[in-house]
Amino acid sequence: MTAQLIDGNAIAAHIRAEVAHRTAALQARGIRPRLAIVLVGDDPASQVYVKHKANDSTQTGLVADLERYPAIFPEAELLARIHALNADPAVHGILVQLPLPKHMDAHRVIEAIAPAKDVDGFHVANAGALLVGRPGFRPCTPYGCMKMLEHIGCELAGRHAVVIGRSNIVGKPMALLLLQKNATVTICHSATRDLAAITQQADVIVAAVGRRNLVTADMVKPGAVVIDVGMNRDADGKLCGDVDFAGVREVAGWITPVPGGVGPMTRAMLLVNTIEAAERAAAHPTPG
Ligand code: NAD
């Protein structure tokens, strides 16, 4: 069997078109959806990410304000800047690019963002809302993975989903989103024993570790859906995921490529969260 490809670029393009439509509807009412992107320091990967996020935003009609601060920027000043953005009714979404410089407490910084503007979905209020099944912003990467599963018509109720990785931004929220859809969820992590024995039982595997070739063909049940979140470099410096794509595609039913899989979906879901934030603000304007 050769797996069908889940084309993240194509699905993301549909999602961006929908966001553009919703943005136009708000603009017609005189509202300009606005995302503030805050970058502290000069991490090369972060610089590329924020540029992509800003470009994606403007291409869908959202206004993106990119604010850059030096690595030595004091945390107190960053917190003050976030408070100002929280209080500004023209700003609908706030994203602080991670990682932050070592002298900053990332938790404290993220907790400073108003939950209603936390379009990354990292604030504990949004994490808690996901845990108890209340509305809130979902972290973009697992949210994008769910959209991919939805797009291929993957029925999750009663199926066994195995999430490899337990980070707060990918693994844990991914597991909760799958659980919300009534999947039977197993979370594997660095201390898991006999990973292969668990993944072999999975109808859906989501790999979010950051280790090349972690998931090989012998670990996958024939016909399973394999979502590869990992972002690694192979020996030639080419971008690759956690899944041995060439081997696993011969066993799986569906598979995401890297690049062109989860990455573009993550970017698209940030736009969805931002337009959602702007629509909610428009529905419940703060008294001025
Ligand atoms: P992380 O380092 O915070 O978490 C990695 C997780 O993998 C940990 O929970 C750890 O317990 C687990 N792990 C480590 N070794 C393991 C092993 N041998 N077996 C099973 N589990 C193991 O990373 P993260 O932020 O969750 O990101 C994971 C990967 O996803 C990275 O490659 C990252 O670059 C990528 N990522 C991609 C996107 C995207 O948009 N495509 C977004 C976010 C993260």
Image (cartoon, rainbow, N blue to C red):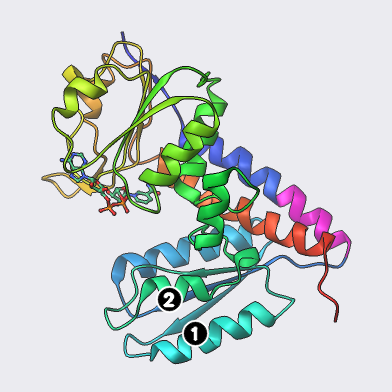
Residue 132 coordinates in the image, percent (x, y):
56, 45
275, above or below 213, in the image: below
Residue type, numbered disc 2: Arg
Give the residue drawn at x 31%, y 46%.
166
> In the rendered image, which quarter is residue 54 located in?
bottom right
Which residue sits furthest right? 29
Residue 240 coordinates in the image, percent (x, y):
25, 41
Alpha-carbon span between mark 2 and mark 1: 9 Å
Q: Is residue 259 visible?
A: yes
Residue 195 coordinates in the image, percent (x, y):
18, 29
Q: Nearer the viewer, mark 2 or mark 1?
A: 2
The rendered magenta stretch, by its main secondary structure, is classed as helix
Q: Is residue 173 left or right of residue 134?
A: left
Which residue sits furthest front? 132
Earlier-in-chain disc, 2 versus 1? 1
Q: Is residue 216 visible?
A: no
Does 22 appear in magenta? yes
Give the residue drawn at x 53%, y 54%.
128
Q: Are marks 2 and 1 in contact (CB under 8 Å)?
A: yes
> In the rendered image, which quarter is residue 26 located in?
bottom right
Q: Quadrant of the C terminus?
A: bottom right
* Label 2 environment density (alpha carbons within 10 Å; few <14, some 14–19, many ≥20): few
Q: Is residue 256 left or right of residue 119?
A: left
What range of the chain is rendered magenta? 20-29
Q: Is residue 68 left or right of residue 21?
A: left
Residue type, numbered disc 1: Leu
Which residue sits furthest top? 1
Q: Which residue is mark 1?
A: 79
Residue 286 coordinates in the image, percent (x, y):
81, 73
